[in-house]
Image: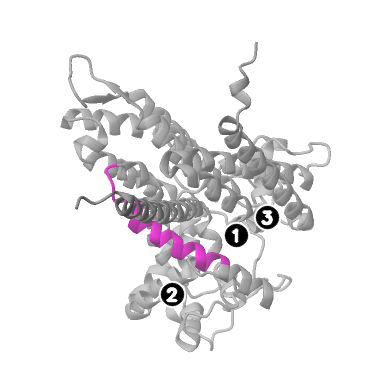
Amino acid sequence: MVNPSFFSTRRAGPWLRLTALVALTLVVRGAVVMAGWQDLRQDPDAYQRLAINLAVHGVYGFENPQTGDVRPTAYRPPLYPWLLSLLVDRPSASIPPQRIAMLHVALGLATVLVVHALGQRLCGKGAWLAAAAIAVDPLLLRSSQLAMTETLATFLAAGAWWCWTVCGLQSVKSPGCRGAMIRPIWWRWTITGIVFGLSILARPTAAVWCALCAAALMTAPPRAAGWWTLAGRWVLVGGFTAGIALWVVPWAVRNYRVLGRPIWGTTHGGYTLLLANNPPLYKHFRRNGPQRNWQAEEFHQRWAARFDSPISPVQPEYWDDATPPARPAGRAEVSAAPAYSPPQDELADDRLAYAAALATIARNPGMFALSCLYRIGWLWAPWPQAANGAARWMIGAWYTIWFILAAYGLWRRTWTERWLAWAPGLLLVVTLTAIHAVFWSNMRMRAPAMTTIYLLASCGVVARSLHAIHAAESRGAGRSGAAASDTVPRAH
């Protein structure tokens, strides 16, 4: 017989809120994806090309323009293309956009549910607020309209953080010990590391995040970490690292077999460093400061001519205005966002991009330092550059309010005995800020860290609300006490 108390208001409240969150996510995300349907047909980062080649030819790579064969690559991280390869329509060798839309809506819903579960452990009653904000976040909504990694990376970052708090920090009493002595279980940290490792295969910048989280676990106070001995710390960190290695090592071994080098990330790093540190962009900074209206056509044209120019991109003359970019007859004009054309040797091309970027930095150390500040501003800008007036101001107001609330929540909530539970979220913000201060940066890059912002803000709202309630109760109790004392008869 069903217990009637199951349907009580206290019991039904959380389920009603959770149902409302699911409905909100499905309606909003579904409507946004349908509104941007045509954008899912675009393939700006070549993830769909990689997925189709993997599904049709069984090779993770790009087509060779000369032979038509598919050549293995490590230019992009493999997890998102692998997911897309499951959606490929083999007869037409294409990915129907409705399948990508369904994948993104499912990942968005999963992210909302994970953030809600994580928020229940970190800020209690504020969990629904953080989850609702994730469901309607403008940046994440726009990302769901694009065949890019932000939707997947945000889900994995939230999932890894949830595993950290639920699985990793879940401990048991140590046999023969008294009091608060607890013993974490190493294999739970291995499971946690497995999820963190997946985030690296979605975005290699997560490797720095994983390293910082391991350092936080290693250096945490005994009471926070749950293990009192140094050897025990090494066991935990070892299990965490082993879980990460279960994904990263096979990817590096594959790259060693097909490319000759054990690349654990991608061969795309040099390009992203050069895109953020090249003479045309530095010229824009000198003329316009941190304005985000830089047009990258000149950079793309000159970089595309690197195979045909007698001057190396490492030399400043290559980028000189007086030196027009060489382009052989019959080669099409390069657009601001050209389709990726694989070079004959992508490892050498990656090294060339790194060398050109480092040479630009060495020639302009002052501008490099200033540009780092500019790129941090680009990363955390409240408003988008391309939006129209009304939408721009609405989005700017949205993020400004949440950033202020997050700062308040950081001040009120995280410096407690549970700081280790907050470590992944805070370190993710630090990681993305540090990396994209040097590498290419825009608002889209911060998407995985929005979970941290909304959870901090929700904790701030809850803390402020509880403070107001307690203050009101204290004032009410004081007035009641004063009234009671006035009614007590006085002895004469």
- 304 or 191, which lies in front? 191
Residue contact at pointers 1 and 2, CB within 8 angstroms: no
- Name the residue rendered at 61%, 40% in the picture: 17
Residue labelled with disc 1:
139
Q: Can residue 52 be seen in this view?
A: yes
Q: Is residue 442 visible?
A: no
Position above or below: 173 against 120: above
Give amino acid for label 1. Leu
- Name the residue rendered at 23%, 19% in the picture: 174
Residue 204 appears at what percent x and percent y?
46, 48
Residue contact at pointers 3 and 2, CB within 8 angstroms: no
As drawn, the residue found furthest toward the right would be 91
Q: In which quarter of the image is the N terminus?
A: top right
Q: Give the range drawn in magenta.
A: 398-417
Relative placement, left or right, of 283 versus 473 is right
Q: Mainly helix, strand or loop, the magenta region? A: helix
Position above or below: 372 against 58: below
> Was residue 410 drawn as part of the magenta stretch in this picture?
yes
- 128 or 43, which lies in front? 128
Q: How far apart are marks 3 and 2 (CA)?
A: 26 Å
